[in-house]
Image (tube, coloured by chain):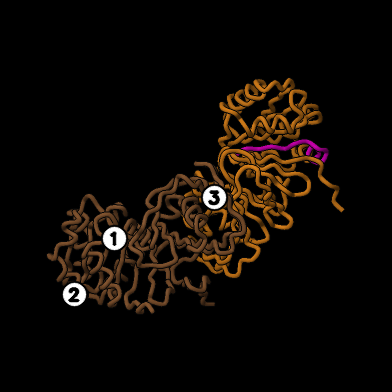
Chain colours: A orange, B brown
């Protein structure tokens, strides 16, 4: 039997507020233990690790967090290096910035850094990520696809993610970039997977029981293909349009919860 | 008992191909009776009636249609004028160009032109429309709303349409402009209505039995809120994000059919 995970995930749809009330990043600090927390910022996704690392450091510093580290990993050699392990061992939150999700998985996959990350998650650490850092949470992640387009099979590219969240495919910048077509394509390919599209400045927080809560200013769209009764996904020529029938959709703003295992929204009435 | 409608509707999601194979406009000509058809182009939606009227005239002319008329209606006075009635009486297809859907309804609503249009539809004429000309087909139409955004109640504006198509709200340029949020808002307000989002260069053709078929290069998204089991639409403050659970969605490309009355896709296996 798999040991129960003690950590939480905070998966952010990108473009979270950094100047106003900062609902999401303040919640991240709270989950990380507040001023006493130890936040590790992983800039591996971005080609601008210096400036992005500094930006988040300043934000968390403004919220009074005393122990903030930035780890810039720019090679697999570095990801197998012991230099940063002390920091990950004491972290209460490990935060992935945005950038390119394939940088995260290609640089960390199979390395000591990934091992430490998963250890931390099982131990009870909050693992957070925004944009590319959100996509990598699932077992299979979307790496590219068309925005503002009807669902088309061969325009979607997927790759193995970090696998912290089971049975789900995440998409981010969801409504703002018109990504429902690409997420529908993903779930048509395997309706076992739940599609979770997270808007900008919006996040889900997931505990070990696979129930998530929405926070932030927009919404989370859930696409459940479990009852799909028809799709032409396997018959298609490249670029043909997908047909799908009977997808169940939920749109949940802040305060609403969803149970991934039972595939039901948890509505407070 | 209402008399059975003999006409067909062709509702086009905008930006239909005008230079390549012209699948949609060729089908329109075919439905209109081919070269022997009488096509009336209504430019009432647009502020550029001259150039848009000429553009479609040239296209239908290229397909060999011998009788093509353009009617520019620019005032309610004009819409009550007898001058163009002969043309509408012999039309086999009346086609609404794109533009602004409120121009169509505010200029035609309650006039002789509208009366003639509805007579023609009952008599067996094909009524077609693209973009704004698509939106006006339903009883209540979307006039404006946010693109690429989460569903929000007070950003959606609706108005009475021409009412040729019952129990449906149409949206156009659907995937291309990221309009699922605004169509979800519309159906949340009254889940009796079926949401039908038509992509660019894509159309539905509806016969009197309320079964439509999809043609064109992209897809039609159907949002069925009949089983909605929760929405906060009536409790919201302006601009708050909508919550909706249990919307059923279908995505249908060319060749697929859907039965509006039974709310079921008709799949050829």
Task: Give the residue pinned by disc 1.
Answer: B18
> Residues under labels 2 and 1: Cα distance?
25 Å
Subunit ID for the residue under disc 3: B
**Name of the residue lying farthest toward the front:** B1
The foreground one among B119 and B97 is B119
Q: Is residue A130 magenta?
A: yes
User: Above or below — where is A262 with respect to A119?
Assistant: below
Residue under label 2, please give it: B90
Front residue of A257 and A103? A257
The reply, left or right, for residue A51 in relation to residue B36 is: right
Q: Position of residue B237 (x, y in %)?
A: 53, 42
Secondary structure of the residue carrying numbered label 3: helix
Residue A80 appears in view: yes
Q: Chain of mark 1?
A: B
Where residue A74 sits, quadrant-wise, is: top right
Q: Residue lying at the far right in this picture: please name it.
A: A1
Q: Is residue B80 left or right of residue A223?
A: left
Residue A157 vs residue B9, the one in the foreground: B9
Q: Which region is colored magenta?
A: A119-132
């Amino acid at each position: 039997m798999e040991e129960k995970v003690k950590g939480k995930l905070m998966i952010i749809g990108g473009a979270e507020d950094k100047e106003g009330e900062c609902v999401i990043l303040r919640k991240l600090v709270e989950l990380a233990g507040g001023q006493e927390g130890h936040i590790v910022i992983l800039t591996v996704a971005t080609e601008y690790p210096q400036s992005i690392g500094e930006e988040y450091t300043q934000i968390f510093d403004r919220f009074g967090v005393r122990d903030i580290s930035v780890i810039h990993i720019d090679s697999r050699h570095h990801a197998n290096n012991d230099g940063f392990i002390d920091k990950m061992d004491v972290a209460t939150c490990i935060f992935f910035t945005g950038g390119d999700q394939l940088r995260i998985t290609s640089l960390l996959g199979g390395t000591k850094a990934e091992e430490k990350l998963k250890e931390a998650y099982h131990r009870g650490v909050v693992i957070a990520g925004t944009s590319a850092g959100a996509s990598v949470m699932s077992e299979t992640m979307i790496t590219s696809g068309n925005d503002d387009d009807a669902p088309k099979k061969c325009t979607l590219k997927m790759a193995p993610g970090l696998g912290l969240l089971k049975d789900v495919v995440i998409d981010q910048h969801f409504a703002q970039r018109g990504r429902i077509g690409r997420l529908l394509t993903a779930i048509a390919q395997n309706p076992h997977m739940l599609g979770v599209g997270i808007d900008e400045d919006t996040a889900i927080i997931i505990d070990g029981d696979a129930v998530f809560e929405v926070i932030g200013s927009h919404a989370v769209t859930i696409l459940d293909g479990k009852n799909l009764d028809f799709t032409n996904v396997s018959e298609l020529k490249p670029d043909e349009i997908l047909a799908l029938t009977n997808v169940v959709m939920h749109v949940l703003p802040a305060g609403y919860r969803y149970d991934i295992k039972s595939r039901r929204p948890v509505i407070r009435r």
